[in-house]
Each structure stands twice: as structure tokens, then as C-alpha cells.
Amino acid sequence: MLGTIGRGSGQSQIAQQGFDAPARAHVLTLVRVARTPRGVHDTMTPVGVFIRQLTGIRAVAAIWVLFYHLQGPLDTLGVMSIPVVSDVIRVGRLGVDLFFALSGFILTHTYLTRLGGGLQARASLEFWWLRLARIYPVHFVMLNIAGLAIVAQTLITGDQRERPWLNVWDYIRNLLLIQEWGPHPDRGWNVVAWSLSMEWLAYLLFPILVIALFFFHRRMSTPVLVLAWFVAIAPLVLRGSLGDDPYYGSAWGSIIRVLTEFTAGAITYLIVMRLIGDDGSIRPRVERLATTVSVLMPLIVIAVQCSWAAGSRHSRRSSSPIPTPSRSPRSSTCGWYRR
């Protein structure tokens, strides 16, 4: 579509496509990007710089998840006894949620105009192939290494011979990256690959999702996009508020987790593009607002969590005849996490 617009008179052809004013400004920016040499957008324009900055956030998320899985060794080293630091590490699983949201954001940036005009079989197949090529080689190697290690441990030590997932069918499910799909996921062969299974599901659905995103981008006002963001994330909030599974590991929890966060990340991109100037520059007012929100939101979350934890402890003390300690050695600040 950009190629067609780029060969015409630009403004008039975009007007004929039926774009509203905010979407028209963004498409004009994309047209200018399409006319520049390959790679210029990634290194020179404000939008390109903004997208590159997200790479740093992905690195932080990866380290956060890594530390979460290294809680045992870190506890031995005494790191988990450090206040605040231990609390941050214990919720490191949230780094995966950040990855899901970033995936929706960046894929929408890359493919909104490529795939959003309508369902395209060839373009969708190419998209799926490129995504699979990024995640599958490492998944295949680690799946088999983990599987061989588990089988070897079982044969050598004789322990846990009756693992319910140690069978050919569950291995095939892991091989096809569908092990986390459904109400009863099985993470046996390579536990951490559950997130790849969810990413693959999001990739498969993205060519359909991006059509709706493209329509929203053309037709919907910014307040409606903000409302759509809240609607997209609502199932996750309800699932977390009404359930007692903090890991979302059962009853479709993982699917709710990835689809809500991936979609919310994609809609976030649409909102961000509305806040960027027609020339691709980031307005000072928007920068100030983003800085303020990024500082206030964590403080609000901490305040609400501490208030909730304090109320919960007070309720337990009032209803229990036996005094309950306010904080155990293994509990986290404000009751965020208890092992």
C-alpha cells in the first residue's frame, strides 16, 4: 500500500483512502520513511530512536527474568536477604509480561501497514516463517538437551520414573510449540519454553489482529483507543483479581495473559503514534507527560499494594486469637510475595 501511495501525489491519495487526520499524519510519516534508504529510519528519525530505546527495556526484562530463575543461588550468596532487591527479584516473572507487551508494540510498528490492509496469505506466511525462524532453532536445541538430561537423570538415579509428562505425545506437543495451549498446559520437558509457546500463538493470530488494529488506527479517535486498551487488558485484571493463581498457569491463564498483554502493547503503539508530531518528532509536552507517568505509576502501585497488605494483616490479627508476625524472614516488602 505504501508503494502505491508513494508513487502518487501523496496527500490526495491518502485522503482518498479514507484516513482521518491523526492516521493521515502517521501514514505520511511512514511514506517518507519508505522513500528513505534502508536503515535510515532505524538510526536517524525520532521514531526510530524511540524504537531502538525499547531494546534496552528488553535487556532489562531478560536480566530480570534470569535473576528470577536464579533465586536459589542468589539466596545462597545472601542477595535475597537484601530488602527491596529481593522483592524485585521475586517478581521477576513479570519480565515475561513485559516481553509480551513489547512484542505487540514492535510488531505493530513493523507490520501495521504491511499486513493491516486485509488478510494476505503470502504476506502472512512470510511473517510466520520469519517469526518461527527467530525462536524455533534455540527452542529445538534446548528442548532436546533438557529432555536428554531428564531421561539421563531418571535412568541413573531411578528417581521420578512416573512423571506424567514423560511420554511421546507431550514431547510432540513441545516440539510443535503447543504445549501451553488449552486449559491444562504441561510444562514438563522444558519448563521455560511455555513463553515461546504463547508467543507462537500470538504470532499465529497477529495477521488477523493487525487488520482490526489498522481499522482502529484509521477510524478511531485517541480516547476510543485508550478505552480499547482498557477493554483489552480487562480479562487479565479480572482473572488476577478473582483467581488464586498468581502464575496464571491453569484454566486458560497463560492464553489470557499473552493475548491481553500482546493486544494492549499493540494498541499502545497506536496511541503513541497519535502523540507524535506530523514530522515524526516527539512533542515536549508528551515527553513531560510520559516522564511524569513513568515516575508516578510505580509509586501508586507500591502505595496501593502496601495499603492492601496492611489492611490484610490487620484483618488477620483481628480475626485470629493467636498473634501473627507482621513479616516473616521470607516475605517481601508490603506482602508482594511469600514463598
Image (cartoon, rainbow, N blue to C red):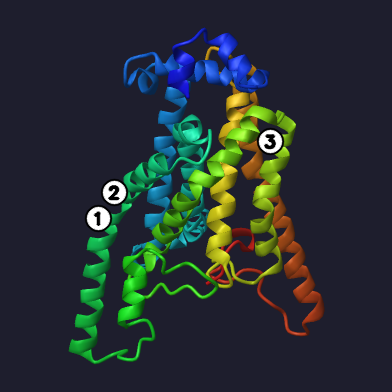
* Rendered position, 172 above or below 200: below
Asked if marks 2 and 1 touch (Cβ < 8 Å), the reply is yes
Along the horizontal axis of the image, is 316 left or right of 110?
right
Q: What element does badge 3 sit on?
A: helix
Q: Nearer the viewer, residue 231 or 69?
A: 231
Which amino acid is tagged 1? Pro
Disc 2 from disc 1: Cα separation: 7 Å
Q: Position of residue 122 (x, y in %)?
A: 38, 41
Residue found 42% across the figure and 52% down from its top: 64
Write down the residue under mark 1: 137
User: How many discs mark residues in the rendered view?
Assistant: 3
Residue found 52% across the figure and 72% down from its top: 339
Q: What element does badge 1 sit on?
A: helix
Along the horizontal axis of the image, is 75 left or right of 134?
right
Q: Position of residue 187 (x, y in %)?
A: 41, 72
Disc 2 from disc 3: Cα separation: 32 Å
Which amino acid is tagged 3? Leu
Q: Nearer the viewer, residue 16 or 288?
A: 16
Q: Is residue 283 visible?
A: no
